[in-house]
Image: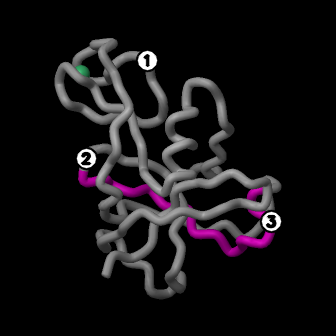
Amino acid sequence: MSDAWLPEPSTANAPFFEGARDRILRLQCCEDCGSWTFPVKDRCQRCGGTNIEWRDASGAGTLYSYGMLHRVYHPRHEGRLPLILANIDLAEGIRIPSNLVGISPADVRIGMALTVDFETLPDGAVIPVFRPAD
Ligand SMILES: [Zn+2]
């Protein structure tokens, strides 16, 4: 399992964090071929085009893989342990890392349907997280 997902705000990813504050999962999408991309890129990973814009994603996905974090490796982990680190296959056809919330680790199942939610961290940043879909 990779390390925790720790995006830091920057000019390039500002729309992502602004979307999260509005409780919208906002990601980049290629205007030429319709492919979504994450993390932030200045070129489409499928067709190489540079005509990329930010769009609102559905927030629906399924669980591809997960791991547990039991120690604080970053101030943003404070008070959130154990943290479920997850890779999620979005309905838009890309896989993104995030955190799984609202579920006991014993109940987590690969392939389960998830929906986006939003969590405000102690430092004030709002990040997308995922919880089981009803
Ligand atoms: Zn493209």
Q: Amino acid at mark 1?
A: Asp
- Considering only order in the chain, which callout, 1 or 2, is on the residue closer to the N terminus? 1
Q: Is residue 125 above or below residue 130?
A: above
- Circle on res. 50: none
Front residue of 69/120: it is 120
- Apparent side of residue 10 relative to residue 78 in the rendered image (left or right): left
Q: Amino acid at mark 3?
A: Glu
Mark 2 Cα-neighbour bin, 10 Å: few <14, some 14–19, many ≥20: some
Q: Amino acid at mark 2?
A: Glu
C-alpha distance separating marks 3 and 2:
31 Å
Contact, mark 2 vs mark 1 (Cβ under 8 Å): no
The structure residue drawn at horizontal position 60% and vertical position 64%, both measured from the top left corner, is 119
Q: What residue did someone put label 1 on?
A: 42
- Apparent side of residue 25 relative to residue 98 in the rendered image (left or right): left
Asked if the beta carbon under badge 3 is closer than 8 A to the nearest atom of ligand 1, the reply is no
- Considering only order in the chain, which callout, 2 or 3, is on the residue closer to the N terminus? 3
Quarter of the rendering occupied by the C terminus? bottom left
Q: What residue did someone put label 2 on?
A: 92
